[in-house]
Amino acid sequence: MADIKWQFRPMSPAEINQESMEREFFQDDTINVRLVREVIQNALDAALDKYEGRLRGSYGPVRVRFSLAGITNPLPAERAQEYIVGLKPHLEAVNDLDNDIALRLKEDSLLASGMPFLVIEDDRTKGLNGDWEQFDDTQEQPAIGNDFYWFFRNVGRSGKGESDNGSWGLGKWVFPDASKISSYIAVTRRSGDGETLLMGQAVLNKHTVVDQRYPPYGYFAEHDTEDFPRPLTTANTEHRPFIRRCIDDFDLRHRSSSGLSVVIPFPRVGGGESEVVLDKNRLLAAVVHNYFFPIVAGHLEVSVEGDGSPVYLSSSNTDYVLDDLPLADTGESSASGYRKLFKMCRDITGLRPDEVVEIGSPGPIQEGSKSHEDLVALRPRYDSEELLAFRISTDVQRRNGFRESSYYSLYLQKDTSLEEGHDYYVRGTLSIPNRDSIRGYSARALLVVNENERLAAMLRDSERPSHNAWYPQDDRVTKRWVATRNRITNVINAPSRLLRILEAAPEGLQRDALTDIFSWDGNWGKPTVPVSVPNVIQEPSSIPIVTPTPPKDLPESRATDFTTTRVGTGFRVRGARSEDSREPFRARLLVAYVVPRGNSFKHYRELDFSLHGPNSLEVTANGGSISPGSSGNELFLDVEDPANFSLTVQGFDGFRDVRVDVKRLAAESIGKEE
């Protein structure tokens, strides 16, 4: 009989002590969201039709199954025992286990109540193809297409292509993360040879057992004399009974066809580090929020099983499933808000090519240009709340490569029922959720980048491992692509730029809408904006815009000559409306991106942005006039009508905080500033 057990390779004295660091990259999401985003992302990347170069959907939608049934109906202890052979000494040696598991280990009762488990499966996918004996990739022996190798024998390295959603090689960490014993067992049927393989992996800390050091990573497999882990295979007659028992024990449904099944023993369902209990409806809500686009398009179906009847989410029943999910009562995250978004997605599929407006310039749209005239002509349709579709051209260029044409699609629809506008960004099939730049508009925007476009590859390189935002100036993207800040920022700002032409500038914004643009006081987490003090030239201290429960020693707000609020991708400065502020005066405006340390204005560079001159940001003034300062971030404001004065600046990088300093100049200093 084969020797099947958990085993960690002993470390040599020369090896460096190193902990697994994957957890640090996924701190922003709850356990439900982490699982949903990474599992479905990998399943869609592994779709059979994509693997074979066919049109998406040729084999039908990719199917993903989350089964929580094993949490309330655990595997009996006598059957569960063989799935943890050899693991217990290593669990006892680590110091970050869930308290419940640590206590049960101490009492030697880990399996007293059986083994609860979570099952995650995908279907109509290719499975883990490739040579399972391969342990390295070199020029002589590359690992192209070796999914098994990349999944089990690499961390922080990926073999995915440019059209895939993932790229960091860290997403599979969500499997051990969801387990209280930081372990999982995978069963895969491969499309390449029809073989079924079984292997497990544990991701613990570096630990010591009986004076022997061990690395964080261990395997549930058959181990040879060199401690090299090999998967169990149905080609091996000694392995077949164990694989079949595993499929039966954990009720794996989809292994009669190619795909991947993952069993997570002792899932995090409360206590310890589990910040949110794994829950059927929370998982479904995460699916709706992150993968609405491929579901509505018919490319993805998800089922979640647990207490009660299974729930299926597909293109035909999205609207009905929403009623039972833990969504907001109102707004875009409510059932009614999602229904409108789903309808928008369905309407997109029915658009004719002649209904799509071509825009050739990805940057700011100049008044008088053809694109500007086309948008002005669309105002009546926009005001009647029609769905407007745009194809926006751009180009991208790899380092040491040629400039290549690309495009993205943008869909806009006015909705006067919205208290705040909302924008959705989709790269390939994956939603990029950390955007919210059109709150001042009564509109819904959906921006889609086709997975096969070169632009999608550049945007993917600008994402961090959790894939929830675009960072135009991160090292990873700037080392691979040319002019990333302008190109990616143009994509991010496209909805607000078009809406500024289609819709009058928004009024009456909430003052706490500054959160995403301006800096805030890290001591108590509320947004702040530097406010000017007359006759003081140095950068002033910040005071709060919103003070729900400020610290007791926070100074009270002082009356100023201006108020500053966020508008789209910029800000608006208004003159004070007090009785003692009616005489004309002159002021100086300074703007800079916030830096972690030091004076933000001293760190300003002309490459950041410019308020005047060629390629300047969009600046408009009412109730006065403006003149350029000596640097690109300086303007002088001649305020003729203080009560009605306003200055609007648009077009900043949406991923950077902005510091604004506007101060009235003393009479004796006027003329000296220039």
Image: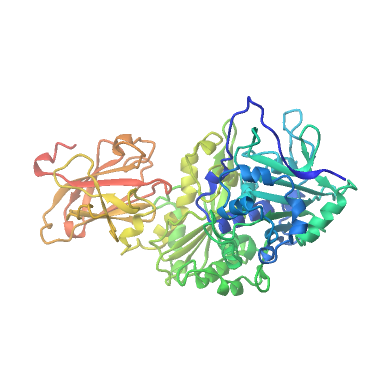
Residue 256 is left or right of residue 542, and the answer is right
Residue 243 is left or right of residue 619, and the answer is right
Please indicate, yes or no, whether residue 313 appears anywhere in the rendered image. no
The answer to which of 149 and 489 lies nearer the viewer is: 149
Total number of numbered discs in the rendering: 0
Q: Is residue 152 above or below residue 560?
A: above
Residue occupying the point 43% across, 63% down: 421
Q: Position of residue 410 (x, y in %)?
A: 53, 57
Q: Position of residue 403 (x, y in %)?
A: 57, 37
Quadrant showing the N terminus? top right
Quadrant showing the C terminus? top left
Applied colour scheme: rainbow
Q: Position of residue 489 (x, y in %)?
A: 46, 46
The answer to which of 465 and 461 lies nearer the viewer is: 465
The residue sitting at the right extreme is 237
Residue occupying the point 81% across, 33% down: 225
The answer to which of 487 and 431 lies nearer the viewer is: 431
The answer to which of 283 and 205 lies nearer the viewer is: 205
Q: Quadrant of residue 280?
A: bottom right
Q: Position of residue 594 (x, y in %)?
A: 35, 42
Residue occupying the point 78% across, 49% down: 198
Residue 514 is left or right of residue 197, and the answer is left
Q: Is residue 306 above or below residue 247?
A: below
The residue sitting at the top extreme is 14
